[in-house]
Image (cartoon, rainbow, N blue to C red):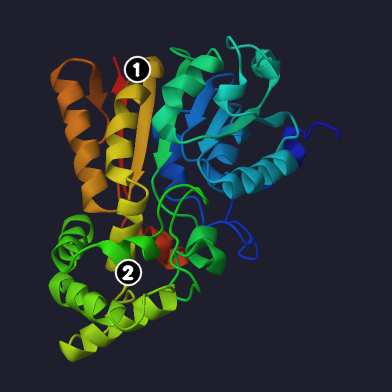
Amino acid sequence: MEKTSKQNKPSLEIENPADSFFHQPVLLKEVEELLNIKKGEWYLDATVGGGGHAKAIIAKGGHVLGLDWDKEAIKFAAKKLASFSPNGEVCPTPPFFENGGGKNQSRPNKDWLLVQESFVNLATVVGKFGLKGKLAGILFDLGTSFYQLTAPQRGFSFKSQKLDMRMSSGQGVTAADLLKVLSEKELAQIFEKFSQEELARPIAKAIIEARQKKPLESGEELAGLIESVYRQKGRKRGKIHPATKVFQALRIVINDEINNLKKALPQALEVLKEGGRLVVISFHEGEDHEVKNFFRAWEKEGRAKILTPKPVLPEETEKKLNPACRSAKLRAILKI
C-alpha cells in the first residue's frame, strides 16, 4: 500500500455517521490547540477509542501510541488509522515484550502504534516502547464510544439484551452480577456517589423488589424499571433518558473508573517530557473533581502549570452536532 500524501489525506471534518463504532471526537479543535501538536513528536492517546483524536494528531505530523482496554476499539481504530496512514501497526500487549525488545524497536519509523491495554498500565507500556520522558503530549478522553453505548451485545445501552458494561469483555463482574448481590443501601450509595441521581433510594428499592421475582438481566428491563420510578414520583422526562445516571454509575463501578484514573494520572505526568502537555476530557463530576485536584496539587508543588483555569466546555454548535458531548469538560496542564 502506498503511503498517503498530505494532499490526499482525508478530511478531518465530521466523521461518517454510518461508521458503526464511533462517536465524534469530542472538543477536537480544543484538543489540537492545547496539545500543541508538533511534527515528529510522539503523543500518547491513552483512550484511543475510534481513533478520531489520534487521526488528528497524525494529520499534523505527530506520531501516536494509542491504548485502549477494549479489543474492539483497537480493531476499529487500526482500520481507521490504516486508511489514513498505513505506516502503523497493532502491537502485542506489554507482557509479550521481553526486555523492551521485539519489533517495537522500529517505533521511530511509525506514524502510529496501538496496544490493547488499560491506561492504568500506561507507564509500563510507554517504557516498553522507549518513550518515557519523550512524550510531547498525553490525552485522556474518558467518554464511552458510540459503539459501546449502542451495541446490544456490550450491555451499555437502554435496549441491550444483557447488562454487561465491561470495557474489556470477559474480565470482571457484569452490571447484572452486581444487581443480583448488592443491598438496597449499597445500590443507593452508588447511584448517589457516582451520578448524583436524585431518585437513588427509590430506584434502589425498586431494583430489590424486582429481583425478588426475577433477576434483572437486560438493559431494557433496568431502563424500564427506572422510567416507572420516575413516573411514580411525578417526574417528567427531560432531555436525557431517566436511566442515564444509573447506567453511568454502574459503568463507573464495574470498570473501577475513578480509582483507575487516580492511578493513571500520576503516571502520565511522570512519562511526559519537560514542556509536555497533559489534556483530560471528563464527563462527570467525579472524574473532573479528581483531575482538578491533581492539577492544582501539581501546580502548587511546582511540577506543572495549569493551562485551563476553568474547564473548557463544548460550544453550542458542537452540542447540537454531537449531543453526547454535552457534559464534557476539558482541563490541561504543562509539565515544568
The CA distance from mark 1 to mark 2 is 35 Å
| In this rendering, position of residue 213 left or right of residue 113 | left
The amino acid type found where label 2 is placed reads Thr
The amino acid type found where label 1 is placed reads Glu
| In this rendering, position of residue 18 left or right of residue 36 | right
Residue at left offset 49%, top offset 50%: 25
- Rendered image quadrant of residue 309: top left
Q: Is residue 273 above or below residue 190?
A: above
The first of marks 1 and 2 along the sequence is 2
- Rendered image quadrant of residue 300: top left
Q: Is residue 147 above or below residue 121?
A: below
- Rendered image quadrant of residue 241: bottom left
> Do residues under tags 1 and 2 come within 8 Å of each other at their CB atoms?
no
Residue at left offset 59%, top offset 45%: 71
x, y (%) of residue 4? 78, 35
x, y (%) of residue 120? 39, 32
| In this rendering, position of residue 159 left or right of residue 178 | right
Q: Is residue 235 above or below residue 215?
A: below
Return the residue found at the far right.
1
SS state under label 2: helix
Query: Which of the numbered marks, if any, corresponds to residue 212?
Result: none
Looking at the rendering, in which quadrant would you find the C terminus?
Answer: top left
Local packing at callout 1 (Cα closer than 10 Å; few below 14, some 14-19, many 20+) is: some
The residue pinned by badge 2 equals: 244
The residue pinned by badge 1 equals: 270
Looking at the rendering, in which quadrant would you find the N terminus?
Answer: top right
Comparing 7 with 200, the one in front is: 200
Return the residue found at the far top.
99
Comparing 169 with 275, the one in front is: 169
x, y (%) of residue 305? 24, 23
Instruction: Inspect this view and state whether residue 44 appears.
Output: yes
